[in-house]
Image (cartoon, rainbow, N blue to C red):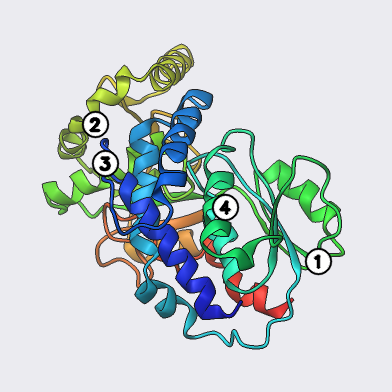
Amino acid sequence: MNLQQRINAFVKLGDFLGQFTNEVVQLENNVEHNRVFLDGFKHQIKLAEEHNGWFTKENILFALKGWANLLTENNLKTWLTPYKMADVSPKKVAVIMAGNIPLVGFHDFLSVLICGHDVIVKQSSNDKHLLPYLAKYLEHIEPGFKGKINFTEEKLESFDAVIATGSNNTARYFEYYFKNKPSIIRKNRNSAAILHGNESGEDLKNLSEDIFRYYGLGCRNVSKLFVPKGYNFDAFFEAMYHWHPIIDKLKYANNYDYNKAVYLMSEFDMLENGFLMIKEDENFTSPIATVFYEYYDSLENLKTTLNNKKDQIQCVVSNGFIETEIPFGKTQKPELWDYADNIDSVEFLLSI
């Protein structure tokens, strides 16, 4: 199985996923093996939603739509063209996945297979229904993948390299346990938005997507705002308001009520609008239903601050602040070449 065959298989997978981008499945006659897999995947989506209260159908379909848009021949070739893919010696790569948002580990899964390696997947119990089914579809449309994809719930054994994603605590365990293997170990990261005070209503409305999508559980979600001294939050709250139905989701509402009670009992100063709280805090990791903010006195000093804390930051959202910034509303729509923690996983996989 050569690179083009692998690309072709993932393009077909993208076509399959493209049917699941709306509430009503859009059946496409030109998608291969629909009769075998379509209804089964609808069932897996239902199981994922029932198993994990954070995985609403809306958020699952949003994730599927993102991958359907990315898995095109043009995108895959644009992503892979800079690399020398020809002389890869296949290895067994273990991938330990997080489970905070639907299919959060898919990029690692894709990267290992597209590079020609075998993948051993250890999933989070929070996100265990979608990927195994998609792997079966992949094997069905490209038999060359059979035997190259394995899922396990047991202790990892007989692997050559590892990509592991977890909390700061689990990362310390990973670093010790995998110290003799080539590895990428990812820790907690969060994303921040830089506001200048002259943002349009559309900018701030787009920012609400970066804050609320997936209930703020992703490392690319904005959990921290940097604002100039004297910033007026009225326009910010106005732009957030269209997300107010989120408070009708029980798990989100419970977190909102709990964190609000903690802040009130602790007599912390905070602002809130009935479904979102903002609190002045130097930390980057904010609780669910809360966004931290911090004032800055100059943009140059802020750049220094962010550079000093770059190991805590996944994305910086702004308009005209730094070269690597993400536009408002785009954090949950990364490209294939937007690597987590800015670590080039394909370069890593080609070097092992």
Q: Are marks 3 and 2 in contact (CB under 8 Å)?
A: no
Residue lying at 83% horizontally and 44% vertically, measured from the top left: 155
Residue 21: horizontal and vertical position, in percent?
30, 46
Of marks 2 and 1, which one's residue comes earlier in the chain?
1
The kind of residue on which mark 2 rests is Trp
Q: Is residue 63 left or right of residue 273?
A: right
Foreground disc of the pair 3, 4: 4
Task: Residue 237: give x, y in percent of width and height.
Answer: 20, 33
* Disc number lying in front (2 or 1): 1
SS type, badge 2: helix
First in residue order: circle 3 vs circle 1 = 3
Tell me which label, 3 or 4, sits earlier in the chain.
3
Q: Real-space Cα distance between discs 3 and 1?
A: 40 Å
CA–CA distance between discs 3 and 4? 22 Å
> Which label belongs to residue 22?
3
Question: Of the residues shown, which amino acid type is indicated by label 4?
Answer: Ala
- Circle 4 residue: 135
In the rendered image of this protein, does residue 121 appear above or below residue 129? below
Name the residue located 72 percent from the left edge and 42 percent from the top edge.
169
Query: What residue type is disc 1 on?
Result: Asp
CA gap between label 2 and label 4 equals 34 Å
**Does residue 264 show up?**
yes
SS at badge 1: loop
Q: Residues within 10 Å of mark 3 (few under 14, many from 20)?
A: some
- In-image side of 177 versus 33 (left or right): right
- The span from disc 3 to disc 2 (Cα, nearest Å) is 19 Å
Check if mark 2's residue and mark 1's residue have beta carbons within 8 Å. no
Q: Residue at x 39, y 28 (%)?
A: 289
Q: Quadrant of the N terminus?
A: bottom right
